[in-house]
Image: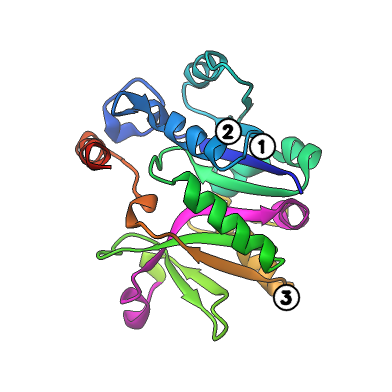
């Protein structure tokens, strides 16, 4: 069965104090976006679509400089992760198989994790498989709540979590494998009925679970897989971690 990847790279990163899209910020001299693309290719996912937004020309120029083809689509308004994936709907329709959706600013989502998560995804005949990580301080992350069988029950955001859920240290990385047909069946059913008026990709998981489809969780071996950067200090932390890898 074929695979493809959608990389979300539309963010501005206002706190980065840079004129570049956040995903072109450098970790060890290499854009975070390139780290993610390299991990995809290392896992055997070579059919890649990057969702661009802020300073889209910079993303286009970078992608066009690569020695292999990478498709781009444009998210004119940044209306959430679900909306970003909606921009890649034609790409998904043309490819079928299984698709992974990744954040373009998570440079340590490695090839092994991507490949092992796909193995679990396919062996369980899952509609979707969320990649999670166990971290010492889960503050600010969406918590992963599993059912008795270990499958995903729900993702609870920090602001919505009760005291017991706040103690959960397994968090959502923001990366998901989907059966592409299953994703397309619910993608346009995601609504923006929330305070931010945005379309959130985790709602696709909620819709699939409500349909009785199987949504599993693959726990990455390294907590670094969830790490990103929102400001220069966090970017420097990523560089420090990368130097030790």
On the question of residue 3 being in view, the answer is yes
Which segment did they paint magenta?
161-187
In front: 151, or 112?
112
> Local crowd at mark 1 within 10 Å, few (<14), some, or many (≥20)?
some
Residue 190 included in the magenta stretch of the image: no
Marking on residue 51: 2
- On screen, 44 above or below 156? above
CA separation in Å, label 1 and label 3: 26 Å
Work out which quarter of the rendered image holds the C terminus and state it: top left
- On screen, 173 above or below 86? below
CA separation in Å, label 1 and label 2: 7 Å
Marking on residue 12: none
* Residue at the image position 73 percent from the left and 41 percent from the top: 92
Residue under label 1: 87
Q: Is residue 38 left or right of residue 118?
A: left
Residue under label 3: 212
Q: Are marks 1 and 2 in contact (CB under 8 Å)?
A: yes
Rendered location of residue 63, percent (x, y): 54, 20
């Amino acid at each position: 069965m074929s695979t493809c990847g959608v990389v979300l790279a539309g963010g501005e990163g206002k706190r980065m104090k840079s004129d570049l899209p956040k995903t072109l910020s450098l970790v060890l001299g290499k854009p975070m976006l390139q780290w993610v693309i390299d991990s995809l290719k290392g896992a055997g996912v070579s059919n890649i679509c990057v969702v661009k937004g802020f300073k889209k020309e910079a993303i286009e120029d970078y992608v066009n400089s690569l020695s292999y083809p990478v498709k781009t689509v444009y998210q004119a308004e940044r209306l959430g992760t679900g909306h970003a994936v909606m921009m890649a709907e034609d790409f998904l329709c043309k490819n079928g198989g299984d698709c992974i959706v990744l954040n373009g600013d998570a440079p340590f989502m490695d090839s092994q994790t991507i490949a092992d998560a796909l193995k679990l995804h396919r062996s369980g005949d899952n509609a979707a498989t969320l990649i999670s990580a166990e971290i010492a301080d889960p503050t600010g992350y969406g918590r992963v709540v599993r059912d008795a069988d270990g499958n995903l029950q729900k993702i609870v955001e920090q602001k919505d979590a009760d005291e017991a859920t706040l103690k959960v240290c397994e968090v959502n990385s923001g990366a998901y494998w989907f059966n592409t047909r299953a994703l397309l069946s619910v993608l346009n059913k995601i609504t923006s009925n929330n305070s931010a008026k945005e379309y959130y990709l985790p709602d696709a998981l909620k819709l699939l679970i409500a349909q009785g489809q199987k949504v599993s969780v693959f726990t990455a071996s390294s907590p670094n897989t969830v790490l990103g950067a929102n400001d220069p200090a966090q970017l420097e932390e990523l560089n420090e971690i990368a130097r030790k890898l």
